[in-house]
Image: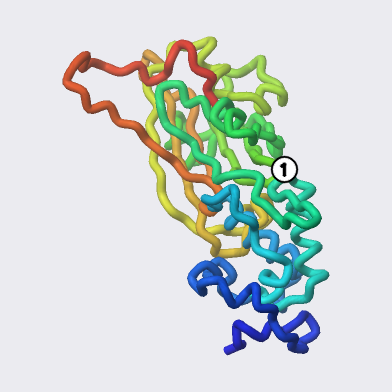
C-alpha cells in the first residue's frame, strides 16, 4: 500500500508531502479512493476532475477553502501539473474559483430535484444558479418495440416519438433523459420541442391526471460512461416515469439516469387532516420539466 504521506508522482517517483496535508483527517479523503486507474485510456487529470466534481457538489462549507494543489497531489499521488490541469477545467466550468493569496473555493452546491405538483425542475435548477443546459441526442419517430409498447400500453409497432437528451449544469453533464410518446399526440413537434419541457407541452394541450414514478439505484454502463463522463460501475440514480391523461391513457413514459454523486431527490408529503381530497398531480401554474 502506498504511504498516504509520501505521494508518488505520475512517473513513479516520490516526493515529500507538505505539512498542510497532515492536518486533514483521513476520512475526508475517502473520495480519493480507490486509487486512480493508471492503465485507463482516460487521462489522470480527467479522472481527478470526475472525483472532484462529486466532492464539490457535496461541499457544505462555502466559506472554507477547497483543498490546495499540494493536498490534492498527495491524495491522488500525481504531479502538480496533473492536478492543475484538472482544477483549471473546473474553474473554466464555473465549479471552482481561484484567487492569488486566497486559495481555491467551491462555487456551486449539489443539485436537488424536489418532487411536487408542478415538477418545476427547470426553475429549481435556475434558482440555485445552475440553469439546465440540454443537448438533444435523438429525436426519432419509429415503431414501438416490446419494451416501449408495454410501457405505453400500446401495440408493438405502433408509431411513437423517441427523445433522448442530456442535461448539464455549469456545463457538467448530470442526467440522460429517455422519453417515449404516442406519435399521434405530437405530430407537430420538432427538435426544438425536445429541448424544452415535453411534459409542459403535453400539459398545455391535454388534461393530465397522474404521474407515477419509481426511483432505484443502478451502476454506470456504456452510455453513462460516454454521456455522463462516469467510470464504469459508478453509482447512478434511475427515475422511471409514466404520465396519464384524464381518459387514463398513457401519454408519456421513460426514465432518467442521474449521476448519483451530483443529484438528489427530495419529497414533501402533506400529512394534515384538513382539506383531504384528490391532489392536483399537475399544477395548473407550474413549469413542468420531464
Work out whether 160 lies above or below 27.
Answer: above
Work out whether 242 lies above or below 281.
Answer: below
Residue count near mark 1 (Cα–Cα under 10 Å), binned few <14, some 14–19, many ≥20: some
Would residue 195 be visible to someone looking at this image? yes
The structure's colour scheme is rainbow
Residue for point 58% across, 56% down? 54
> Residue 95, percent across and down?
69, 48
Work out whether 227 lies above or below 239.
Answer: below
The tally of labels here is 1
* Residue that extends furthest to the left in the rendered view of this protein: 273
The quarter of the image holding the N terminus is bottom right
Q: Which residue is disc 1 drawn over? A: 171
Q: Nearer the viewer, residue 2 or 196?
A: 2
Work out whether 22 lies above or below 175.
Answer: below
> Residue 117, percent across and down?
41, 22
Q: Is residue 132 left or right of residue 288?
A: right
> Residue 135, percent across and down?
71, 37
Q: Nearer the viewer, residue 69 or 210?
A: 69
* Residue that extends furthest to the front in the rendered view of this protein: 101
Q: Nearer the viewer, residue 19 or 189?
A: 19
The quarter of the image holding the C terminus is top right
The quadrant holding residue 21 is: bottom right
Residue for point 73% across, 55% down? 102
Residue for point 60% across, 64% down? 232
> Residue 156, percent across and down?
49, 35
Would residue 290 be visible to someone looking at this image? no
Residue for point 37% across, 14% down? 247
- At mark 1, the secondary structure is loop
Amino acid at each position: 500500500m502506498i504511504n498516504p504521506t509520501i505521494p508518488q508522482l505520475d512517473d513513479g517517483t516520490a516526493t515529500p508531502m507538505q505539512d498542510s496535508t497532515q492536518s486533514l483527517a483521513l476520512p475526508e479523503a475517502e473520495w480519493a479512493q480507490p486509487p486512480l486507474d493508471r492503465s485507463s485510456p482516460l487521462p489522470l487529470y480527467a479522472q481527478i476532475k470526475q472525483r472532484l466534481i462529486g466532492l464539490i457538489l457535496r461541499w457544505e462549507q462555502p466559506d472554507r477553502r477547497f483543498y490546495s494543489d499540494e493536498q490534492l497531489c498527495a491524495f491522488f499521488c500525481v504531479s502538480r501539473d496533473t492536478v492543475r490541469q484538472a482544477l483549471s477545467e473546473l474553474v473554466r466550468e464555473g465549479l471552482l474559483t481561484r484567487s492569488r493569496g486566497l486559495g481555491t473555493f467551491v462555487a456551486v452546491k449539489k443539485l436537488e430535484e424536489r418532487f411536487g405538483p408542478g415538477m418545476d425542475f427547470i426553475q429549481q435548477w435556475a434558482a440555485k444558479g445552475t440553469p439546465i443546459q440540454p443537448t438533444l441526442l435523438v429525436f426519432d419517430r419509429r415503431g414501438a418495440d416490446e419494451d416501449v409498447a408495454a410501457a405505453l400500453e400500446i401495440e408493438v409497432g405502433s408509431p411513437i416519438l423517441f427523445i433522448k437528451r442530456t442535461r448539464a449544469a455549469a456545463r457538467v453533464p448530470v442526467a440522460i433523459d429517455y422519453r417515449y410518446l404516442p406519435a399521434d399526440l405530437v405530430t407537430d413537434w420538432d427538435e426544438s420541442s425536445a429541448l424544452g419541457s415535453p411534459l409542459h407541452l403535453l400539459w398545455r394541450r391535454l388534461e393530465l391526471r397522474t404521474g407515477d414514478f419509481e426511483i432505484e439505484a443502478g451502476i454506470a454502463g456504456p452510455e453513462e460512461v460516454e454521456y455522463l463522463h462516469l467510470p464504469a460501475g459508478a453509482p447512478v440514480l434511475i427515475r422511471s416515469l409514466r404520465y396519464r391523461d384524464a381518459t387514463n391513457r398513457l401519454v408519456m413514459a421513460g426514465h432518467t439516469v442521474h449521476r448519483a454523486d451530483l443529484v438528489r431527490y427530495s419529497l414533501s408529503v402533506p400529512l394534515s387532516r384538513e382539506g383531504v381530497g384528490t391532489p392536483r398531480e399537475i399544477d395548473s401554474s407550474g413549469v413542468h420539466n420531464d
